[in-house]
Image: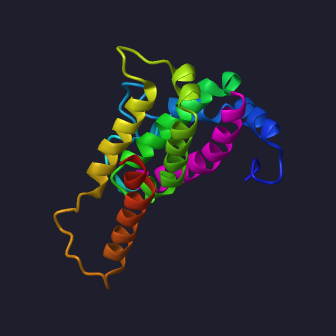
Amino acid sequence: EITVRGMDDEKKLSLLIQLNLFPLLSQMTNSQTNVESKLIDCRLDFSDVDATQVEALAATAELTNSAGLELIQGWENDPIPASRHMEHCLEMAMLCLAYDSIDVSGPVIELIARCLNSIEKKETIWNTSFGGSNGETVCDKIISRVLAIVGTRMAYPSDFRFDYEDEEESEEEMYRAQLRKQLFVRIV
């Protein structure tokens, strides 16, 4: 909310870098450590679908989306000071998107779509900022990863009954439509 209130892009970028938000969030995930993580020891566990984690992870996803949308805008204009932050932001967004709960993966769809748009228009900035190896560009890796996650998330759970009057199942359908329209169609 702080960065959305009429602040110019340069100041937003400076504030986001100063807050060190995305590197701190990355440190709190189990993807960056080999420690078994739960809320009790102040870690966010993206490896296990756990009802106690969903609320914290959903809030993390919403924060990642809103701050990430502001970060990418400033990063595209001046990538050098914010590359490390953008890398952590993208990783957090990917972890959220891959999590098996629409409350966690849904909020970051907008940010992932924005990243795909940026990759399409500013591929050189992405590849220069994050490097590439073995002839495969960073952009190719990101797109492949998003496509793999979307493929997994589009699958219906075994207990899905296609009852569109059921509120949960109708939310699931809206979520899949959003994945299809904002991510899958953009990639393919």
In-front residue for pair 118/66: 118
Give how far across and how far down residue 67 sits, in percent. Answer: 64, 45
Q: What is the quadrant of residue 73 in the picture?
A: top right
* Residue 30, visible in the rendered structure: no
Which residue is rendered at x = 16% and y = 63% of the image? 158
Which residue is rendered at x = 47% and y = 50% of the image? 57
Q: Relative to residue 10, is residue 150 depicted above or below?
A: below
Q: Relative to residue 11, is residue 65 depicted above or below?
A: below
Which residue is rendered at x = 19% and y = 75% of the image? 161
Left-right relation of 48 to 68? left
Question: Of all residues shown, which one is farthest toward the left?
Answer: 158
In-front residue for pair 26/175: 175
Question: Of all residues shown, which one is farthest toward the bottom?
Answer: 165
Most prominent secondary structure in the magenta stretch? helix
In-front residue for pair 157/115: 115
Give how far across and how far down residue 134 sits, in percent. Answer: 35, 14
Residue 63 on the magenta segment: yes
Span of residues in magenta: 52-78
* Residue 51, visible in the rendered structure: yes
Left-right relation of 160 to 78? left
Which residue is rendered at x = 83% and y = 47% of the image? 7
In-front residue for pair 135/83: 135
Residue 54 on the magenta segment: yes
Q: What is the quadrant of residue 143 in the picture?
A: top left
Give how far across and how far down residue 86 sits, in percent. Answer: 59, 32
Give how far across and how far down residue 95 sits, in percent. Answer: 42, 41
Q: Relative to residue 17, is residue 80 depicted above or below?
A: above
